[in-house]
Image: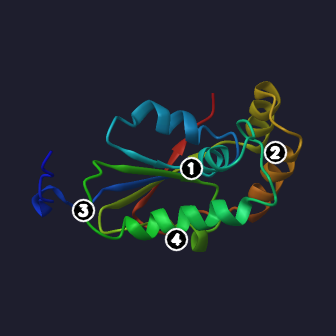
Amino acid sequence: MTQKPLTYSKFKWTPVTAIVGAPCAGKSTTVDAVSKPGDLVIEFDRLMMALTPLGTHEHSDQVKSFVWTAQKSLLRRLRYPSEVNRAYLTALAPTNEQRYRYLVGHKASMTVLEVSPETAHNRAEEAGRPGAWHEFIDMYFERYEEPDDPRIKVFHAEE
């Protein structure tokens, strides 16, 4: 079987959409609703599940550095043309400094899913998230800053 030569004409700048917000704001649900085959999804929980025998929303402190390394590597790769149709990434990113890291490439956009602390805690409880999620929620809101970049849109995601 002969291998087809690599054609660079298929490579393009991948639009990167970051969906950020508090734990339980609906980031994964949003990405699941809009992503299609051929899209790349970069999400901490999915990477953790891929690298460990743990279930959804469970984290291993021993593996976290590997997950962060994988995420950084994927984000670096998105700074170059590829065959990926679109990339979505999710993150907490409560501060503007953190958000800037996820505005990757010249076709970058970001949406902050805004929910109240009460809504986030209620969703965590309803979803049966581990107890640490309540600490993550509180830490997120303690550090939260209003977005200061015109590429960042805020979407009120209350029920």
**Given this view, does label 2 or label 1 mark the residue nearer the observer?**
1
SS for dot 2: helix
Residue 133 in sight here: yes
| Labelled pair 4, 2 in contact (Cβ < 8 Å) | no
Task: Please name the residue that numbered disc 1 is placed on.
Answer: 43
Query: Residue at (64%, 67%) from the top-left corner?
Result: 95
| Labelled pair 3, 1 in contact (Cβ < 8 Å) | no
Per the model, the C-alpha gap separating discs 2 and 1 is 16 Å
Q: Amino acid at mark 1?
A: Glu
Q: Quick one: label 1, few (<14), some, or many (20+) residues within 10 Å?
A: some
**Residue 38 as seen in the image, left or right of residue 56:** left
Which one is earlier in the sequence, the residue at label 3 or at label 1? 3
Which one is earlier in the sequence, the residue at label 4 or at label 2? 4
Numbered disc total: 4
**Color encoding of the figure:** rainbow
Task: Please name the residue that numbered disc 3 is placed on.
Answer: 13
Residue 26: quarter of image: top right
Q: Quick one: label 4, few (<14), some, or many (20+) residues within 10 Å?
A: few
Q: Amino acid at mark 4?
A: Arg
Tell me the number on the disc at residue 101.
Answer: 4
Tell me the number on the disc at residue 24.
Answer: none
Q: Amino acid at mark 2?
A: Trp
Task: Please name the residue that numbered disc 2 is placed on.
Answer: 133
Q: Quick one: label 2, few (<14), some, or many (20+) residues within 10 Å?
A: some
**Given this view, does label 2 or label 3 mark the residue nearer the observer?**
3
Q: Position of residue 75 (x, y in %)?
A: 46, 65
